[in-house]
Amino acid sequence: MPTQKKHHISAEDLYKFQQIADCRISPNGRWVVFCIQRTDRKTNKNYSNLWITSTKGSETRQFTYGDHKDSQSKWSPDGTRIAFVSNRENEKQSQIYVISFDGGEARKITDLKGTIGIFEWSPDGKKLVCQFRKKDKEAVEREKDEKKKEMGIVSRHITRVFYKLDGSGFLPKERWHIWTIDAHTGKGKQLTDSDIYDEVEPQWSPDGSEIVFCSNHSGDPDLDPDAIDLFTISAKDGKLRKIETPIGPKEKPIFSPDGKWLAYFGREGRAQNWKNVSLWVIPTDGSEKTKNLTAPFDFNVSSWTINDVPGDLHMMPPTWLNDERICFQVAQHGNTTLKSIALDGKELQTIIGDSGVVGSFSFDKKQTKLVYFHGDMIDLGQIWIRDLITERSRKLTNINVLKNRDLGKIEEVWFKGAAGNDLQGWILKPPGFDENKKYPSILEIHGGPRVQYGNFFMHEFYYLAARGYVVYFCNPRGGQGYGEAHSKAILNRWGTADYEDLMAWADFVQQKPYIDTKRMGVTGGSYGGYMTNWIIGHIGRFGAAVTQRSVSNLISMYGSSDLNWSFQEEFGEEAPWDNLENYWQQSPMKYIGNVKTPTLVIHSEQDLRCPLEQDEQVFVALKKLGVDTEMVLFPNEPHGISRGGRTDRRIERLNHIVRWFDRYLK
């Protein structure tokens, strides 16, 4: 038979890719429920439905149907029912549904007006605990009155500092609170209530008598955002109890199976974002001090390895394998692995350590089977099962198989940074690469800054390579994944160690015989946009640049971003009016007069993380300087357009990037 010709990655492939999410194994270990998200090419809307696969790999079938969004699938403790969130009756209002695993129609059990966050079954399967935020009374009244609905919002009365969030817009006055919901009748009971505090991430105690959650009960949580504490509340009478823990951000608390311990993720101290997230434990009765189990290992407890095709990289709560061991994700050296550690902080073990990323995972009731999401450089992600007795893994799904795509060849390298430090990078060569030819190249810079590039699929990189570019990317100092010293290197020193490492990386790559040193480009988004702006203001080695959703002026960024005043935590804990020169010294706009590099500016009009004015300043300055420049804006899109934007706009963005680089590098 003739060999099937392989095609190159295209921008339009974004319509074909499907995303797996929320994989959960049944208590008896026989089945896995998961979600598949797809895009309707005609409407550019995203939909998701539930699917079922056998852990034997013998059967995979769609479980729910329809053009809507089904998500957060959760097995009942006895494995007979699946609860999930869906907007099937009202596109703008999701509810919780329950469906029998034996089949039949899904039954809506809630009739809430507001936003449903995470939820969990009670141990006896009779109730659900839910994180829920009511819709503001004014919004409810406006929806009931056609005249008011037509007129829209008259004004916004804002009293809190953090009043908006990228991707969500202006925040409601209502706060997140803890509710319990009867799994049969759907009757809800609100357990917490406050106009000031948010209560989030609830989890049941093993006997169902208490619920643990996170909340910030400081005088003004917006002005002391790291003062997050753990609380328990009685499911019966609402009695509240604070668990004494060190000051610092905390998330995802969970009881041990015997109810004697709480495990959670967090950092100690205020304004210490450069620190690793760690795994902590504390006795529920407060008889001992909190212990940081992962402190000796200098790694970041996290799920995040950056990508642009949203995979199932959920940060899962600490998972107790028994009363003595805890399982958790670690983002390190370009991978997201799954590890476990004993309660005494000893015997660190790697459960899943393959090259790539581990997303959501779950164990069966006997804890002999582990189901998990895993993706890598050439696979957008599949569901795998691991037999914990034989320690063998097997793939259960085959979604988005790219066997008919020529992706090019990718090479992982370690090299020396500007200070003699060890750095990790990757070089992607175009399909049909010829070592005797000279190629144009593009340096890609990640956002964050405290994230990592790594062994996960990046559609943008493969698309650029398919257009004939060598694409190279690395993890310079300032990001996570390489220890606290690596992360802290740019604290109040943006544009120093990070810039030096990126230039050392460019030096390393341009020495390759296949690199045309006169046709090198640079691009990045968010903090990567900041670094793109910084680079073109300091050196003229690149023939073209594309700066995306960037930061350019730290002074005007203060207070205008949804991160608000908290930027000062990164810059010496001083506000601009206390040290204006420090902010200006680290702002790319200070050096914009040096730019001669042709630069395309890309931004989203509803970006609340890096406001539009940040890139407008760049565009106007370059125009005034006579530098070749254009600006492309995307309406109705938030900050993360590259991975979560409307598909036609994501494609348009990619085409503009290629158009610009083709103009100046080919």
Image: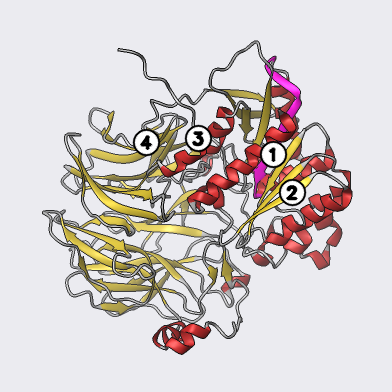
Ranked by sequence position, the earlier of labels 3 and 2 is: 3
* Closer to the camera in the image, 250 or 439: 439
- Give the CA distance from mark 1 to mark 3: 17 Å
Looking at the rendered structure, the kind of residue marked 2 is Glu
Q: Residue 630 bears which disc, if any?
A: 2
Q: Earlier in the sequence, mark 1 or mark 2?
A: 2
Q: Which mark is residue 10?
A: 3
Alpha-carbon distance for marks 3 and 4? 14 Å
* Residue 515 relative to residue 219: left or right: right
Q: Are marks 1 and 4 in contact (CB under 8 Å)?
A: no
Q: Which mark is residue 660?
A: 1
| Alpha carbons under labels 1 and 4: distance apart | 29 Å
Indicate which disc residue 400 carries: 4
The quarter of the picture where the N terminus appears is top left
Query: Closer to the N terminus: mark 1 or mark 4?
Result: 4
Nearer to us in this view, 483 or 176: 176
Q: Which-is-in-front pick, marks 1 and 4?
A: 1
